[in-house]
Image (tube, rainbow, N blue to C red):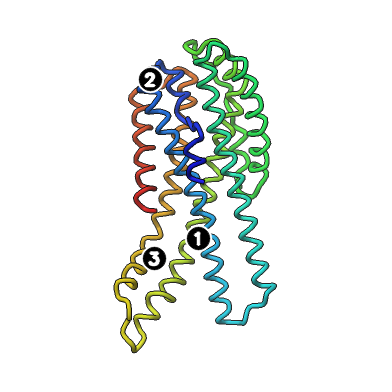
Amino acid sequence: MRKNIRQTVAIFAVIAALTSGCRSSEEYKKLTKAGNEYAIAVNELLTAAGDIRIESNSEKLLQDDKILNQSETDYRTLSQQDEDWLKILNDIRTHNELLQAYFSKLQALATSDAPEQAKTEIDGIAGNLNSIGHKLQNSTLITNKSILQGATNLVISSQIRGALREELEKRHEVILKELTIQQEVLNTVSSSIEQDVKSIKSAQEVRLVIRPLIQIEPIKNEDEWIKTRKNILLMDRKIEEIKKASTALREFKEIFQASLEGKLTQARLNEHLQDIDTFFALIQNTK
């Protein structure tokens, strides 16, 4: 899966360059790298969210089984909840990938001498994005529906011309809304993971750390026990990673809006790119 993600031309930040006079090949490379790294990190976090939920419910089954012997029905019920959660995460992943594809095509629209093909492809992507966004909007992931009603009709900067201007005038409100949807669902995933991690930590610390320690017999594999204890105590890092993903997306939405209005500075753009680099490094160092 990682290979497929890396092959995706994910340019979450390129539009900021296109609309702020940043056009050198080196700057495009830097922006492309940052966008790819952000997309990879978000996808890895969504995978982690699925793994963590399954692990949390597995611990719950073991705990409940100690109290009352679990039936196959009990098991199937909880497993169905896991399957439903994985489907939701897949919808978020699809939405994320469609946003990536949209911004990638915006770059093509701005730099191509023959933008008609890019226009056609953008229309298809936007249609799919609206469909999956509508599904997420009507799900339980977004509790504050009113936050999606505040889209602003921006005045597009005079620096933006041609086919790119035409597209942004047509669809900038929709894209700002889709970015808000992505931000809000990541917030919900963050809260869910936080609860799951607390549940896992509590159960595994008892089952894998405390219980072996208080046995009369000495722990046989001390190094493994230490490693297990460390991993359990450091589980909270995943919560911070999800929060950083949501923060990075909120910042990008603000940058996108500022770039449309011609208010984006190079310093702010560079700061955002550095934040994405830091976010990606955190993901890589805690896997």
* Label 2 sits on residue: 25
Q: Nearer the viewer, mark 1 or mark 2?
A: 2
- For this rendering, which residue is in front, 91 or 248? 91
Give x and y (percent) for residue 100.
53, 33
Residue 26 position by quadrant: top left
Give x and y (percent) for residue 21.
40, 15
Classed neighbour count for the residue bearing mark 2: other residues with Cα under 10 Å, few (<14), some (14–19), many (≥20): few
Distance, label 3 to label 1, CA atoms, is 14 Å
Position of residue 60 in the picture relative to residue 35 (left or right): right
- For this rendering, which residue is in front, 14 or 267? 14
Give x and y (percent) for residue 196.
50, 61
Classed neighbour count for the residue bearing mark 3: other residues with Cα under 10 Å, few (<14), some (14–19), many (≥20): many
Give the residue drawn at x 38%, y 42%: 279
Give x and y (percent) for residue 270.
34, 28
Amino acid on which disc 2 is placed: Ser
Circles 3 and 1, Cβ within 8 Å, touching? The answer is no
Q: Earlier in the sequence, mark 2 or mark 3?
A: 2
Q: Looking at the picture, does residue 145 appear above or below residue 110?
A: below
Circles 2 and 3, Cβ within 8 Å, touching? The answer is no
Give the residue drawn at x 46%, y 32%: 252
Q: Which mark is residue 232?
A: 3
Give the residue drawn at x 51%, y 16%: 110
Judged from the image, the secondary structure of the residue bearing numbered disc 2 is helix
Q: Looking at the picture, does residue 167 appear above or below residue 84?
A: above
Position of residue 241 in the picture relative to residue 127 (left or right): left
Query: How many numbered circles does the render carry?
Result: 3
* Label 1 sits on residue: 195
Distance, label 1 to label 2, CA atoms, is 44 Å
Judged from the image, the secondary structure of the residue bearing numbered disc 3 is helix
